[in-house]
Image: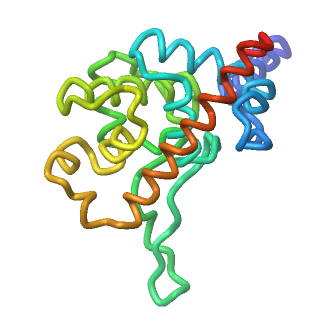
Amino acid sequence: MSRTLRTFLLLLLVAACGGRDSGPAPKDLDNACTILAQRPDYGRAFRAAERKWGVPVHVQMATIYQESKFDGEARTPFRWVIGVIPMGRISSAYGYSQALDGTWQEYKDERKRFAARRSDISDSADFIGWYMSKSKERLGLSLNDARNQYLAYHEGRTGFSRGTHKSKAWLVRVAGTVADRADMYKAQLRSCRRGRLF
């Protein structure tokens, strides 16, 4: 194999492996302005999803915080037998959005985004926008209602309409913290915009 061909193949491999969102999660996840200052690509992704789907940036950010703490490689923990034998993960949830395999495939098929990756912030933001806009359409949930949008996101729209969340006090509490975080991020984003940081 010629040296030129080897160099070309090596560059191609590096380009294919190099993710757009490589690196650890941002620091200070309690400050929306700091997150966006550290990761300008996040801001671009969130604004694009907001323009396309109408889901506010602060709602997207609060959802991603709760689901993955802004870790694009986040996965659910393993299940263990006898405390030592791994038996697969609790679910197929993966990436920023923690979308399940089936729901992610539905999104890719419907949107014809066959190369979309859950580890890519732009794809994950678009997924959240798509999912929540469907929750608005089917369940009548406001796109600004972080609490109920999160409950429908977590339980699925059918589960939400059946009220499965009502028997899960822990989940109702979590949804409340998502709503509180969305409010906090919303206030912070106003100051980012005033300072022209976002």
Q: Residue furthest bottom?
A: 82
Q: Residue furthest left?
A: 162
Please say if 39 is above or below 112: below
Residue drawn at 39 percent across, 18 percent down: 113
* Percent x, y of residue 186: 59, 29
Please say if 9 is above or below 146: above
Describe residue 128's horizontal placement relative to residue 13 as left or right. Answer: left
Residue 95 figure quarter? top right
Residue drawn at 82 percent across, 17 percent down: 7
Q: Residue furthest right?
A: 3
How many numbered markers are drawn?
Answer: 0
Please say if 39 is above or below 69: above
Residue 34 figure quarter? top right
Describe residue 9's horizontal placement relative to residue 66 as left or right. Answer: right
Q: Quadrant of the N terminus?
A: top right
Residue drawn at 61 percent across, 40 percent down: 72
Residue drawn at 64 percent across, 41 percent down: 70
Please say if 152 is above or below 53: below
In front of the other: 117 or 16? 117
How are the colours assigned in the image? rainbow
Residue 38 figure quarter? top right
Describe residue 195's horizontal placement relative to residue 124 as left or right. Answer: right
* Percent x, y of residue 183: 55, 36
In front of the other: 187 or 69? 187
* Percent x, y of residue 66: 54, 48
Describe residue 39's horizontal placement relative to residue 83 as left or right. Answer: right
* Percent x, y of residue 108: 35, 25
Q: Quadrant of the C terminus?
A: top right
In front of the other: 124 or 193? 193
